[in-house]
Structures are given as C-alpha cells and as structure tokens.
Image (tube, grey):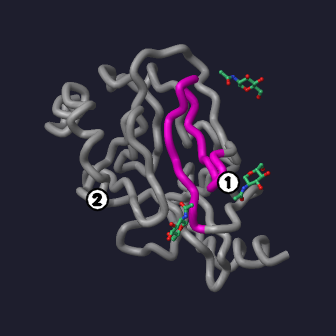
Amino acid sequence: MADPPIFSFFCNSIIVLSLLPLSYTADTLSSVQSIREGETLVSPGRKFELGFFSAGSSKNSCLGIWFVVSPETVVWVANRNNPLTDSNGTLKISNEGELVILNRSNSIIWSKNSTKVLGNLVAQLLDSGNLVLRECNSLESADYSWQTFDYPSNTILVGMTLGWNFKTGLESHLTS
Ligand SMILES: *[C@@H]1O[C@H](CO)[C@@H](O)[C@H](O)[C@H]1NC(C)=O
Ligand SMILES: *[C@@H]1O[C@H](CO)[C@@H](O)[C@H](O)[C@H]1NC(C)=O
Ligand SMILES: *[C@@H]1O[C@H](CO)[C@@H](O)[C@H](O)[C@H]1NC(C)=O
C-alpha cells in the first residue's frame, strides 16, 4: 500500500502540525492533537467522518462515525452508554496509548485500551469506516493496536450493506 502523502508529512511533522488547528481536512489524529465538538476527521476518500454529534434536540453528545453524504446515518458510536451532557467533549490519545474521550472537567468518560504497546500512536479514519489506532510509522493492519471493526456489536458496518439510521434509536436512549 502506498503511503498517502499526508501520512509521511504527518509522521515527520507532528510538532508543526500540533500548532495547526484541525480545521483542515485530516484523516489522522496524532498524539499531540485532539478533536473537540465541531472538529472532525474525514477519511481520505471523503466517505466517512468522525466527530461529536447530538441526536435530535438532545444536548447530550456522543462521538460517532457517519457517512459524509448522509450525516444523519451514524454507523458507529463510541460512548453510547455514557453520553456527554454538554458540548465540551474532547477525543485524544492518552499518554498511556489509549483512545479517550474527556468531559469538560477532564475526566475520562470513555476509553479504549491498546492491546499492544506501541510507540508513537496515531488514530486514523479509513475509507472503510474503520477507525484504527496504530503506530505512526506502520500501515500494517496487523499492527493496529485497536480498531472499531474489532467491536462488531458497536460497528454497524461489519457485514452490512446498508447504514443504520441511529438517530431515532439514540434519541429514545438519551432522553430516557
Ligand atoms: C464548552 O463549549 C461551549 C460551546 O462549544 C464553549 O463556548 C465553552 O467555552 C466550552 N467551555 C469549556 C469550559 O470548554
Ligand atoms: C465528568 O465526568 C466525571 C466522572 O464521570 C463527573 O464526575 C463530572 O461531573 C463530569 N463533569 C462534567 C462537566 O460533566
Ligand atoms: C486497560 O483496562 C483495564 C481494565 O479494563 C485497566 O485495569 C488497565 O489499567 C487499562 N490499561 C491501561 C494501560 O490503562
């Protein structure tokens, strides 16, 4: 697999990039960056987008992945069982190499352990809709330390040809 240009640029320029806001279209989150409400990752082919969203009129928000062409079709949700009660969530890679969501008071409300001890981790949203945590210098899928596709109960894309309209289901969950 050829490295996408952004990849080499990214690994070599982490410090520089950390000074940039995530407002440009990025598919990769480095260990020194974070995603807040309103900021998103977009897969290289612009198929999938990851970010915080609120369902309906709810103020609660969750981190999810949705189709770029159909944002109401959320295909994966991270903190479904522990939604944020305000719009001040942050997604980042912790010093321990976990993907974490922090609330306004910097408490971890959702986290995913790495299964492998790796070096410099990045999180990348792929065109398959898979969010992977991997070593910056490796694109090998065997080296993914964590991926949403490993969680089929949460990952509606696995084995499915149609997206799942999550909005209705989430609304009843969040307002209960
Ligand atoms: C929480 O989010 C709101 C809206 O995005 C923002 O105006 C406010 O500054 C945030 N508060 C904190 C403590 O980050
Ligand atoms: C953040 O989460 C912690 C632990 O769940 C909770 O005690 C705290 O009230 C939360 N803070 C906000 C601002 O939601
Ligand atoms: C991974 O998760 C377990 C519990 O699920 C926790 O005890 C452990 O500290 C976590 N590992 C890291 C590196 O945080």
Q: Residue at x 57, y 23 (%)?
A: 96
| Residue 91 in magenta stretch | yes
| Position above or below: 168 against 81 | below
| Position above or below: 172 against 7 | below
Residue 52 location (% of width, % of height): 52, 62
Q: Nearer the viewer, mark 1 or mark 2?
A: 2
Label 1 sits on what residue type? Asn
Label 2: how many residues lie within 10 Å, few (<14), some (14-19) or many (20+)? few
Q: Is residue 110 left or right of residue 144?
A: right
Q: Which residues are magenta?
A: 87-106
Residue that numbered label 2 is attached to: 23
Q: CA distance from mark 1 to mark 2?
A: 23 Å
Circle 2 — which element? loop
Q: Earlier in the sequence, mark 1 or mark 2?
A: 2
| Position above or below: 155 against 55 | above
Q: Residue at x 32, y 26 (%)?
A: 139
